[in-house]
Image (cartoon, rainbow, N blue to C red):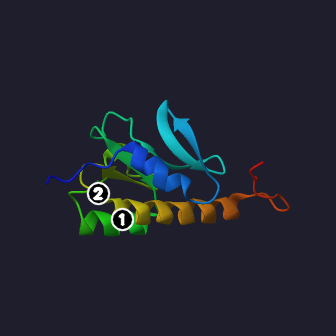
Amino acid sequence: MPKQSVTFNHVRELGLALAEVEEGTMYGSPALKLGGRLLACMAVHKSAEPESLAVRTDFETREALLAEEPGTYYVTHHYVNHPIVLVRLSRIKKDQLRDLLRSAWRFVTAHNKRTRPRGSRPATRS
């Protein structure tokens, strides 16, 4: 039985299971955000392969992913200076995607804490 490709519906399901993650868009593309900051979105830049997901990550983690699984993870010149890794949805397994989104959640959460003005509080859901 052939492996079924992961879709953005799977990304959405896994991402929305994480605390405070919301659906949105980025440049007209479906996205997941945390506190208004990008967590993951379908890559829309012309340098990205079709059906690729852009996921926030730190540069060290990105390098490790690229070294471990270059068939699944990649980066193009457009994204090289941004804390993002591109993911071929046709190659990633759901458990890998879950781990990657959790890692992105931790990255964005840590970034939000570092950049939040003193005395401000994170947004809460009503």
How crowded pointer 2 is (Cα within 10 Å; few <14, some 14-19, many 20+) is rated as: some
**Within 10 angstroms of label 1, few (less than 14), some, or many (20 or more) residues?**
few
Which x, y percent locates residue 112?
66, 59
Task: Report the label total.
Answer: 2
Location of residue 61 in the rendering, given as x and y in whole percent from the top left corner: 40, 68
Q: Of discs 2 and 1, which sits in the foreground? A: 1
Residue at the extreme right: 119
Q: Which amino acid, by three-letter code, is at mark 1?
A: Asp
Q: Quadrant of residue 70?
A: bottom left
x%, y% of residue 68?
A: 25, 69
Q: Badge 2 is on which residue? A: 92
Residue under the point 25% across and 57% down:
72
Q: Which mark is residue 95?
A: 1
Q: Is residue 75 above or below residue 118?
A: above
Q: Residue at x 32, y 33 (%)?
A: 46
Left or right: 49 with respect to 121?
left
Q: Nearer the viewer, residue 16 or 26?
A: 16
Task: Check residue 113 in the rendering and tell me which mark sits there, or answer none.
Answer: none
Task: Determine contact: label 2, label 1, CB under 8 Å.
Answer: no
Q: Nearer the viewer, residue 94 or 70?
A: 94
Most extreme residue toward the left is 1
- Residue type beneath disc 2: Ile
The quadrant where residue 47 appears: top left
Q: Residue furthest top?
A: 28
Q: Residue at 50% across / 42% down in the picture?
A: 31
As helix, strand or loop, the secondary structure at mark 2 comes to loop
Which SS class for mark 1? helix
Q: Position of residue 5 (x, y in %)?
A: 26, 48
Res 62 → quadrant:
bottom left
| Residue at the image position 37 percent from the left and 43 percent from the top | 78
Quarter of the figure with the N terminus:
bottom left
Q: Label 2, label 1: how many angstroms apart (C-alpha)?
A: 8 Å
